[in-house]
Amino acid sequence: MLLDAWLRRAGAERPHVPAVVTDEGSLCYLDLDRDATRVAVALFALGIEPGDRVGLLLEPGLEFARCLYGVLRMGGVAVPVDPRLGPQDRAARLAGCVLVLEGERLRGEAILNILGLPEGPAVIVHTSGTTSSPKPVELSHANWWWSAAGSAVALGHDPRERWLCALPVSHVGGLSILIRAAIGGTTAIVHPRFDPERIARDLAAPDGPTLISVVPTMLARLLDAGLQRPPSLRAALVGGGPIPPALLERADAAGVRCVTTYGMTEACSQITTGGPPLFCTRVRIAGDGEILVRSPTVAPGAVATDGWLHTGDLGALDEHGHLRVTGRATDTIVTGGENVAPAEVEAVLEAHPAVAEAAVHGRPDDEWGEAVVATVVLRDGMRADAETLRGHVREHLAPFKVPKAIAFTAALPRTPSGKLLRRDL
């Protein structure tokens, strides 16, 4: 079944249910289905053919939803791109697109027409670029369907679901919320950007969102904004990076139920949710500790010759088959012959009451090969010096894991979706 067929079904069966809710208004499924057809007709009139790549250089909102489903309706391949990017990054992501939808204008590109097979990609999503330059990932209609089905089984499916999206829709975490909503005939509430005070107010409303997707930094800022016992929220889906145990404890004390998730663009978002893999997904740990994934959610082009997606992440499976991610293989610090996972040290630092955020990485060192160092953001009004924090780590971890140096900063480098850019430290 094609992605567009889910929208048609939702338009027929749940015509007046809000499909997308934004600052500028809302679209019910009947109107979104109608508008998608108008966009598709306009694209055909411009000579766009099935399989052509069409860039979506649009802010999150109603126009993005109309254009996304219009492209899918006429059989095109959607390529969402964050409009906040600079000209060079935009051009790199839009290479291969025969047309770019930008604001209310259609901008034609004199680029070779790239045709896809009927079973080819539905959407091309770029990775977040936390460890290297962003790369395009071709996700098929089947990838999106299996991902939505696996998520619904893991989280439960409520036909009255209202999933709040404050993640960029140019990345898989945000885009998947819109597509899951169409598949299930539920509502996506799309915010143009992450505003913790506003989201905390929305979640506090009696008829507020039932689900929200956040990265750990977003969750911390929502709690800082006073989020307490949101009445309608079933769960906050937390992923996109290591999740400090202290943060989960803080959320639990505030009455915010968190469901941890591990995923990546190449697997069309979720791989594990709540601990175990999605029902359609298999996970195993290679001999060197790398997490390997096999699933119909995995982009065909991301599958290695052995039939598995090699994630580049390190982890372990417990006796219940629940996955624990310990970090990126490329992030591992080798100091004096010992391996150090930055996420483990970061979790201890962030458990200190004065620390809001911490980032750990290796620094070349003549004596140790690499030295463990940290960069820390202190909480407003709190004080702590480097030696105090080093002593705190020493109380919980082996001596070789204690940072040799700790620097302080006002903010850590992050992607638009909130992921830590460790390579920029």
Image (cartoon, rainbow, N blue to C red):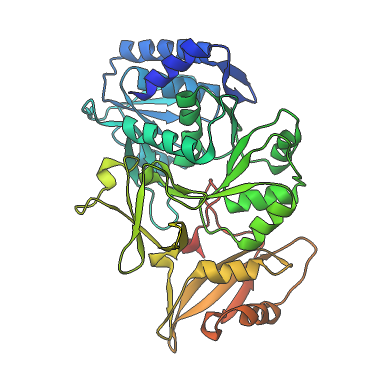
Foreground residue, 334 or 43? 334
Q: Is residue 294 above or below residue 350?
A: above
Indicate left or right for 153 with 384 as reference: left
Q: Position of residue 311 (x, y in %)?
A: 35, 56
Instruction: From the viewer's perspective, tell me whether residue 190 is left or right of residue 114.
Output: right
Measured from the top left, where is residue 38 in percent x and y? Answer: 42, 10
Residue 346 in which image quadrant: bottom right
Most distant residue in the bottom direction: 367
When the figure is inspected, residue 133 is found, relative to residue 57, above or below; the finding is: below
Q: Quadrant of residue 142?
A: top left
The location of residue 194, given as percent across then percent down, is: 63, 41
In the image, 89 versus 42, the foreground residue is 42
Q: Is residue 408 above or below residue 320?
A: below
- Answer yes or no: is residue 212 visible: yes
The number of numbered discs placed on residues in the rendered structure image is: 0
Please state if 237 lies on the left or on the right of 229 as rendered.
left
Instruction: Please report the residue visible at 53 percent of the width from the left and 57 percent of the height from the top.
Output: 420
Q: Quadrant of the N terminus?
A: top left
Identify the residue at the far front of this view. 319
Q: Nearer the viewer, residue 59 or 149?
A: 149
Q: Position of residue 7 (x, y in %)?
A: 44, 19
For image coordinates 46% across by 61% down, the residue present is 325
Q: Is residue 82 visible?
A: no
Pick whichever, 400 or 375, lies toward us: 400
Up-down relation of residue 351 to residue 57 (above or below): below
Q: Residue at x 60, y 61 (%)?
A: 244
Residue furthest right as drawn: 381
